[in-house]
Amino acid sequence: MELQNIREHCQANQRTRVKLTYLEQEINEDQEVNLERANMHLERLLDKEDKDLALLRHMSFHYRARNMNAKARIKSLNEKLRKETSREKEAKEQDRLRILAEASLAQHGTP
């Protein structure tokens, strides 16, 4: 925006045929060169930030997918654990009942 204003100012000066001193011409050229350098620097920074943003988006997608995969695996493992725990409980209950039945039969003298 500033670069455009300076160029318009220079064009307006040329139209009015105002003679600039050598020093004023050099100052105007230096201003334009400095603004172009700053503009190029800002463009490089913007390009770098765009690349960083693209990388962050990719990483976000990657880790979100890994997280979903891990959650599904945890859910599956929890289901297996629940089933195995219930099997163990049933087996313990059957063992307890079997032991009680054997003890009861032993008390009554049935072989």
Image (cartoon, rainbow, N blue to C red):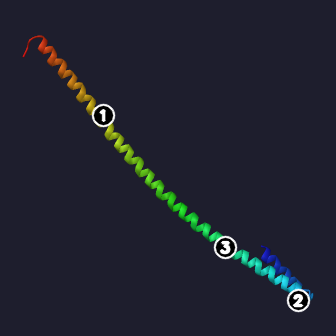
> What residue does disc 2 label?
22
For the point 68% across and 74% down, the residue is 41
Q: Answer with the quarter of the image where residue 17 lies.
A: bottom right
Helix, strand or loop status at disc 1: helix
Which three-letter amino acid code belongs to the residue tagged 1?
Answer: Thr
Instruction: Identify residue for label 1.
Output: 85
Secondary structure state at the residue bearing disc 3: helix
Q: Which residue is pictured at 54% across the width and 61% down the height?
A: 56
Amino acid type at image mark 3: Glu
Quadrant in the picture for the C terminus: top left
Q: Name the residue under label 3.
A: 43
| Residue 16 placement (x, y as % from top left) | 92, 86
Q: Answer few, some or many: residues within 10 Å of disc 1's Cα (few below 14, many 20 plus, some between 14 and 19).
A: few
Q: How far apart are marks 1 and 3 (CA)?
A: 62 Å
Residue 45 relative to residue 91: left or right: right
Image quadrant in which you'd find residue 74 = top left
* Residue at position x 11%, y 10% in the image: 108
